[in-house]
Image (tube, rainbow, N blue to C red):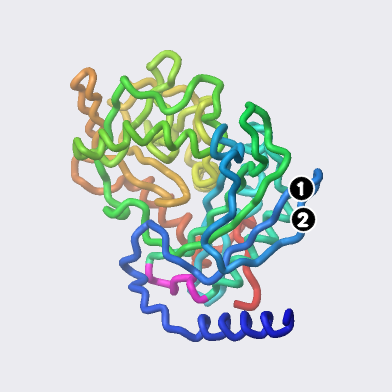
Amino acid sequence: MQRFCKTVLQNIATKIMKEDLNLDWANLPFGYVPTDYNVRCYYRDGKWGDIEVSTSETIDLHIAATSLHYGQEIFEGLKAFRGRDGKVRVFRMEENARRIRNSAEGLCMAPIPEELFCEMVKKVVSLNARYIPPYGSGASLYIRPLEIGITPSVGVRSSSEYVFIILVSPVGPYFKEGFKPTNICIMRQYDRVAPKGTGRFKTGGNYAASMKSGNHAHELGYSAVLYLDPREKKYLDECGPANFFAIKDGRYITPASESILPSVTNKSIMQLCRDLDIPVEERHITVDELEEASEAGACGTAAVISPVAEVDDLDTGKKYVIASNGEPGPISTRLYNKLRAIQLGEEEDTHGWNTIIEGI
């Protein structure tokens, strides 16, 4: 019976792999497209188990699981690209592995070993190779690792059991406008996170806390909210779901704050700036400094760089015009193109950021 079931599953998998996807790669949304497989691993009795391959899009979760009641949930986001040479590259996998480990420690969850994280990323990308968008389409394979507490508890305590899942989906750009400047706004009545809270960890609660303000901004015609520091409302903080940066006097400046999620993309861009002899400053940035910015943008895995045309302070009525001609600035454009070229294998990966997935 077991052999029969295995044979049936193999036949189904073979049939699925031969089916045409009929995906419009160039016009994919940044959403969820079902793929063939996801991979999972359970933490029980103080240790991580074996990697499991699944075709199911659901999980069996206890109604009292700590992730549902007390927010024990963390995740990551990274991408795989089909390069000009046909090779598949995953960008900065190890850096994401380190960040999710930091998030796990911050939320008192079982840290995922870096080796396990990387093995599961490679496996899920290989299993879903046909969903990797072709070179030149502008799309990529988005990789979403997720860890949740699964121990049932109605008392506030850390889970003793966890499941770590990685799913993938082909996606287009996060911002529909693409690499074009958009307007963002400042709304002081909203905070994304609390001072010294969970802002530096990638947990769903931070994003839930930003939805009301984000929806409000979208209703007003803005692409994102530029949050101020939650303590003094004086310094620039996160920009919607991404880090913020500006170019001032030829320098790349980006906010330094304990409430900001350390962006892998921002970290990469800062290194590229140093490679290009562009001075980098991580420091507190006051709102008024936007008057002196020649360029600005939000940066993250989803969009790489989303240039900013104008920042409207809705409380003071002040408008900070960054890109009056409606085009991205030269430094932002140079950094965007260079990072994308490295991801796609068009330029040499001098820092060893890419992991090439063999055999696909």
The residue indicated by pointer 2 is 49
Q: Quadrant of residue 176?
A: bottom left
User: Which residue is at a point 63% across and 60% down the rendered structure image?
Assistant: 121
Secondary element under disc 1, as helix, strand or loop, is strand
On the image, the x and y values in percent for residue 316 come to: 22, 18
Q: Does the CB distance between marks 1 and 2 fall below 8 Å?
A: yes
In the rendered image, the vertical position of residue 108 relative to residue 39, given as above or below: above
Query: Dot 2: within a 10 Å radius of its alpha carbon, few (fewer than 14), some, or many (20 or more) residues?
Result: few
Camera-nearest residue between 8 and 250:
8
Q: In the image, what residue type sits under mark 1?
A: Arg
The residue indicated by pointer 1 is 44
Secondary element under disc 2, as helix, strand or loop, is loop
Q: Is residue 288 visible?
A: no
* Prevalent SS, magenta region: loop
Say whether residue 159 is magenta.
Answer: no
Q: In the image, what residue type sits under mark 2?
A: Gly
The residue stretch that appears in magenta = 130-137
